[in-house]
Structures are given as C-alpha cells and as structure tokens.
Image (spheres, rainbow, N blue to C red):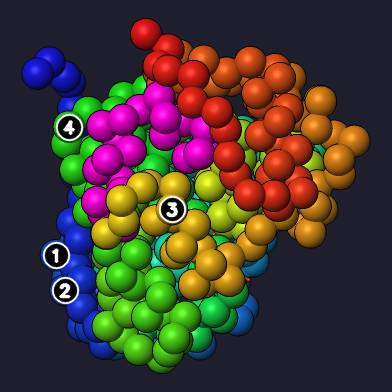
C-alpha cells in the first residue's frame, strides 16, 4: 500500500438541539467578541435564535447562489467596517460560500452551521462567480475552523431539496472512489458516507420531521465532504461543474440526476469500488443499489426537466472531455460521453456495456 493522505484540521460538534450551546462554546474557545452572522433572509430567524446568547456585531443576509463577486466584495467591506473577528454562517452551500469568500481575503475564522447536505463546510474549496463564470480554488484559509451540526435545523428543508442535496452528498462519496487523490482513507470515509445516506435519506423522505433520519443524512453528508475534499473531483464532478457553470443548471439536482450514469459507466471497470459501494447499499450491485434508493426517494431523473437543452450535448461533451481526470477507471471517448449525456438528458435507464479497465 503506497499513498499520501492529507487530513484537514477542523473541529466538529454534532448534536441535535445543541447548536446554540455548541456555538457559545466555540465563540468562547476562539476568544471572539465581534461575530458576523451570515444567513439568507429566510434562515435569519434561525441564525438569530442560535446566536441570541452570544451577541452579534453584524447580521448579514445578502446571500445569493454561487457567490457573485460583487456580493463578496460588499460582504468583505461590511466585515471590515464592523471590525468583525469571527464569521458564523447558518445555511446551505451558498451561505457557507459567502463566508468563505470573506475568509479568503481577510483570513477571518469561520464557524459553519450547515442546514443542507451540500458539504461545503468540510472543504477548503471556494467558489466565486463573475459575469456568469464560476471560478473555484483551494485555500486553507476558507476551511471553517469548526462545524456545528444540529439535525433539528434541517427539518424545514423541503423533501425534494433534501433528496437532491442528499444525492449530491452521495455523489461526493461515489466519485471519491476514483477521483485523482483517492486513497484507502478517503475511500473508507466515502463508503461509510454511502451507508449513512442510504439509511438517512429514505427516513427523511418517510418523515421529514424525524431527527434520527436527519442525523444520519447530516453525518453522511459530512463524511462525503471530507472524502471529496481529500480525493478531489472525479469524472462525475467534472461533468456537473460544466453543466452547472456553462448552462446554469441547479447544483444539487444536477448532481442527483447525473450520478447513476457515471456509476453505471465506471462500475464495470472498477470492480473493487463497485463491490464496496454495493455492500454499502446492502445490494448485490452498486448500480442496482443506487437505482433502488433513487426510486424510493423519487429522485430527479432527466436533465431536460431542469433546463438542459439537447442541442447543447455536443458542446458540453467537448468541454467535459478535456476535464476528465486521468485517474478515471474507464477511458472516456467523445462517443461515450455523448451517449452518457444524452441518456441523462432523456432520463433513460443508465446502462453501458462493460469494456474492461483502462489499465
Ligand atoms: P443553497 O445553499 O443555495 O440552498 C438551497 C435552498 O435551500 C436555498 O433556497 C436555501 O434558502 C434553502 N435552505 C437551506 N437550508 C434550508 C433549511 N434548513 N430549511 C429550508 N430551506 C433551506 O444550496 P446548496 O445545495 O446547499 O449549496 C449549493 C452551493 O454550494 C453551490 O454554489 C455549490 O457550488 C456550493 N458547494 C460548494 C462546495 C465547496 O466545497 N466549496 C461543496 C458543495 C457545494
């Protein structure tokens, strides 16, 4: 066994109903006295409730998807004007993304309190959008120093969003099995993430108010993000990055829709990963396990339902092909990629002939 693995330093406090208590502990531990609370206007009441005991120097709700650069600049100025010494973000990936944009230039620490399963809180990846182009980068300054998970904050996340967001997390896990820096440690985290999400998401679907299902889903989402941050972006993430960035498709839904096609394509060429993913689903086949889970969740099925035009398939294929990592277990041709995108566009049953491994 030969590998090089990096673990990112981060404190995780997990406890349902404990967000306010755990935040107070973190603020005191970090010696912070001027907190900037960041939450979208719809989640601001939740943020205010959690921060009621600690005092806040600035409450900031100008959050938008994919962190437009002008909003990042405004938020950085506001943080400086209020002499902020800690960023506390309460919300999904868009909110965490704004906190990261501030931390990127100021070095301010972040305590993240996630309310979706996107997983941005556990990565050192930032993203900024300028003139419809999203740029991403890696910088340890944007890694939240602490993450506070409280399942009770996620019960209001609508079921359809929960399913899409949870399958986004599942995609982090599956793609980690063949991403460029895949190793035995991040694979183990990814497999446990799949197991937890496969337990949690059906429970959330059956009863969105059930804290136990929500806890499994959050725990799985955290593992998925740690695995993804360590292993990097594989074929699946490269596809979704192009689809989201170039055609403005919704983030979580795009991941949820594309995943079964990438798994069906790669699985025959990655037998070890296939067997471990299958076992995590409690199924004899990884593809069947995922398809069964998706059916039980009423998962999003076809890219054509979410704004992707059939006419864009050749262009998307060209853009994606250039980005496919050399680590992918199966060689990817223009023809194969076009077939995959067409199937994902139509929502047809994912099936690809096995062709053996790349090696
Ligand atoms: P999001 O943050 O935009 O949230 C989606 C919607 O859910 C919003 O309308 C939000 O108000 C609502 N919402 C969130 N939590 C809620 C709750 N508990 N109850 C009710 N409504 C709630 O979407 P997302 O999928 O969480 O994040 C997507 C963004 O995160 C994308 O920009 C993506 O690129 C980024 N992301 C970054 C990383 C990274 O490592 N940097 C990782 C994953 C995702």
**Circle 1 or circle 4, nearest the eye:** 4
Q: Is residue 300 magenta?
A: no
Q: CA distance from mark 2 to mark 3?
A: 44 Å
Residue 29's disc is: 1
Query: Residue under circle 2?
Result: 25
SS category of the residue bearing label 1: helix
Establish if 225 lies above or below 21.
above
**Circle 2 or circle 3, nearest the eye:** 3
The CB of the residue at mark 3 lies under 8 Å from ligand 1: no
Query: Residue under circle 4?
Result: 184
Q: Going from the N terminus, do you reach mark 3 or mark 1 first? A: 1
Quarter of the image where one finds residue 211: bottom left
Which residue is rendered at x = 80% and y = 52% of the image?
A: 304
Q: CA distance from mark 2 to mark 1?
A: 6 Å
Q: Position of residue 333 (x, y in %)?
A: 63, 15
Q: Going from the N terminus, do you reach mark 4 or mark 2 first? A: 2
Ligand 1 positioned in quadrant: bottom right
Query: Residue under circle 3?
Result: 288
Which residue is rendered at x = 71% and y = 52% of the image?
A: 347
Q: CA distance from mark 4 to mark 3?
A: 24 Å
Q: Position of residue 268 (x, y in %)?
A: 42, 30
């Amino acid at each position: 066994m030969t590998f090089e693995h990096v673990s990112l330093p981060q404190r995780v406090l997990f406890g349902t109903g404990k967000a306010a208590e755990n935040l107070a502990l973190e603020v005191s531990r970090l010696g912070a006295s001027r907190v900037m609370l960041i939450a979208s206007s719809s989640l601001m009441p939740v943020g205010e409730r959690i921060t009621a005991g600690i005092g806040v120097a600035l409450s900031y709700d100008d959050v938008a998807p994919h962190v437009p650069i002008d909003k990042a600049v405004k938020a950085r100025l506001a943080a400086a004007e209020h002499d902020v010494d800690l960023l506390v973000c309460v919300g999904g990936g868009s909110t965490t993304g704004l906190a990261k944009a501030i931390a990127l230039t100021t070095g301010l620490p972040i305590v993240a309190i996630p309310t979706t399963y996107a997983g941005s809180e556990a990565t050192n990846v930032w993203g900024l959008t300028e003139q419809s182009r999203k740029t991403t980068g890696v910088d340890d300054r944007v890694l939240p120093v602490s993450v506070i998970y409280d399942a009770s904050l996620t019960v209001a996340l609508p079921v359809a969003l929960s399913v899409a967001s949870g399958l986004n997390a599942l995609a982090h896990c599956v793609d980690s099995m063949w991403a460029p820096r895949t190793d035995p440690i991040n694979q183990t985290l990814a497999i446990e993430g799949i197991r937890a999400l496969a337990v949690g998401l059906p429970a959330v679907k059956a009863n969105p108010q059930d804290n136990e299902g929500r806890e499994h889903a959050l725990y799985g989402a955290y593992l998925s993000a740690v695995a993804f941050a360590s292993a990097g972006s594989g074929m699946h993430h490269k596809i979704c990055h192009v689809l989201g960035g170039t055609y403005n498709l919704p983030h979580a839904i795009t991941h949820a829709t594309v995943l079964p096609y990438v798994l069906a394509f790669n699985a025959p060429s990655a037998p070890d990963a296939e067997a471990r993913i299958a076992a995590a689903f409690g199924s004899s086949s990884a593809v069947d396990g995922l398809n069964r889970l998706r059916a039980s969740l009423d998962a999003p099925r076809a890219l054509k339902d979410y704004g992707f035009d059939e006419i864009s398939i050749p262009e998307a294929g060209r853009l994606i092909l250039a980005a496919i990592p050399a680590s992918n277990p199966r060689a990817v041709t223009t023809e194969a990629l076009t077939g995959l995108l067409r199937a994902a566009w139509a929502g047809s049953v994912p099936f690809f002939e096995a062709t053996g491994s790349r090696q």
